[in-house]
Image (tube, helix red, strand yellow):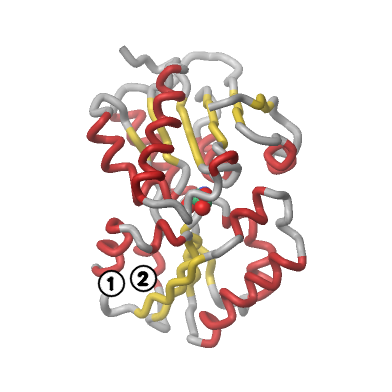
């Protein structure tokens, strides 16, 4: 039986999903959370759908064994490839997924051209194709962010290699006159300062973090699972490789445990 005092579980292929965790924690500071960074298996974006499903099931099982009342799939690649499977396999568990925020960009664009940067796994997924097909009047320029996740996971956010890759991926979108860039990977919000240096100032950058946090709150309320007890919320982070970069991204404020999962 689930109850409101149980933690919310989150997982990602690595540290990127902490961009989602930060939004959820800001909106729901009273909730206990357990975050799994499956960095050992990153990047998910280059794996097959079957591999992504298997890893998502492994992470979900781990979080359910730790008594989580809800699972946030803080990864676009895992959501677009595996959430349908997870919802079927665990019908009693509320799942929140994260998908590229195409809709807000598509309804607001003035140039009728938007760019999306995401993993290969997300851009090739059925769910993403379905979303895109709803906006056939808009030109959507897709770009796989090859190697960006690997560089972020190894702490090279501010490296010359990162800058070079971002210029190569974003310049063609700028030349094509996009006015919105959708960040379709939960790792990419950590690249916003670098991306802003490349994009002209009128191009808006959108990610899904805030929307996911709002949706998490709505689903907790609907299921009577909002934690209203007065307590000091516990935020637990597990990683299955070196915790150094995760620690850095969390400003050394939380305890991170290295575990095998
Ligand atoms: N952070 C993930 C996403 O949102 C996955 C990145 C990866 O492992 O390739 O897509």
User: Residue, x 54% and y 75% (percent of image)?
Assistant: 203
Where residue 251 sits: x, y (%)?
Answer: 74, 39
**Horizontally, is 214 left or right of 21 in the view?**
left
Which residue is denoted by mark 2 in the rendering? 106
Where residue 64 sits: x, y (%)?
Answer: 40, 21
Q: Nearer the viewer, residue 52 or 194?
A: 52
Q: Secondary structure at mark 2?
A: helix
User: Residue, x 25% and y 62% (percent of image)?
Assistant: 130
The reply to whether residue 23 is visible in this rendering is no
Number of the front mark, 1 or 2: 1
Label 2: few (<14), some (14–19) or many (≥20) C-alpha neighbours in 10 Å: many
Look at the picture and state if 253 lies above or below 44.
above
Does mark 2 have its CB less than 8 Å from ligand 1? Answer: no
Tag count in the figure? Answer: 2
The reply to whether residue 89 is visible in this rendering is yes
* Tag of residue 232: none
Where residue 162 sits: x, y (%)?
Answer: 69, 65
Which residue is denoted by mark 1 in the rendering? 135
**Which badge, 1 or 2, comes first in the chain's sequence?**
2
User: Residue, x 28% and y 72% (percent of image)?
Assistant: 135
Where residue 191 sits: x, y (%)?
Answer: 64, 59
**Horizontally, is 235 left or right of 209 in the view?**
right
Q: Nearer the viewer, residue 234 or 63?
A: 63
**Horizontally, is 146 left or right of 157 in the view?**
left
The N terminus - image quarter: top left
Look at the picture and state if 245 lies above or below 197.
above
Mark-to-mark CA distance, 1 and 2: 7 Å
Q: Residue 248 is drawn in which quadrant?
A: top right
User: Residue, x 49% and y 85% (percent of image)?
Assistant: 177
Q: Nearer the viewer, residue 14 or 34?
A: 14
Q: Secondary structure at mark 1?
A: loop
Discs 1, 2 touching: Cβ within 8 Å: yes
């Amino acid at each position: 039986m689930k109850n409101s005092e149980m933690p919310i579980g989150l997982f990602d292929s690595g540290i990127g999903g902490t961009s989602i965790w930060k939004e959820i924690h800001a909106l729901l500071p009273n909730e206990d959370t357990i975050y799994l960074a499956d960095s050992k298996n990153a990047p998910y974006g280059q794996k097959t759908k079957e591999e992504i499903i298997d890893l998502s099931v492994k992470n979900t099982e781990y979080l359910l064994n730790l008594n989580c009342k809800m699972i946030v799939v803080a990864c676009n690649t895992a959501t677009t490839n595996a959430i349908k499977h997870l919802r079927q396999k665990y019908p009693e568990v509320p799942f929140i997924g994260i998908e590229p925020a195409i809709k807000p960009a598509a309804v607001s664009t003035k140039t009728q051209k938007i760019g999306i940067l995401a993993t290969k796994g997300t851009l090739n997924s059925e769910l993403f194709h379905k979303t895109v097909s709803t906006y056939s009047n808009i030109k959507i320029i897709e770009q796989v962010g090859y190697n960006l996740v690997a560089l972020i996971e190894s702490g090279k956010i501010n490296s010359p290699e990162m800058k070079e890759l971002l210029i190569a991926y974003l310049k063609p979108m700028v030349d094509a006159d996009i006015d919105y860039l959708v960040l379709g990977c939960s790792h990419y919000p950590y690249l916003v300062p670098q991306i802003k240096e490349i994009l002209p100032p009128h191009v808006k950058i959108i990610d899904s973090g805030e929307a996911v946090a709002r949706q998490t709150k709505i689903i907790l309320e609907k299921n009577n699972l909002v934690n209203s007890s007065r307590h000091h919320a516990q935020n637990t982070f597990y990683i299955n490789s070196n915790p150094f970069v995760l620690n850095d991204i969390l400003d050394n404020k939380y305890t991170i445990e290295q575990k095998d999962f």
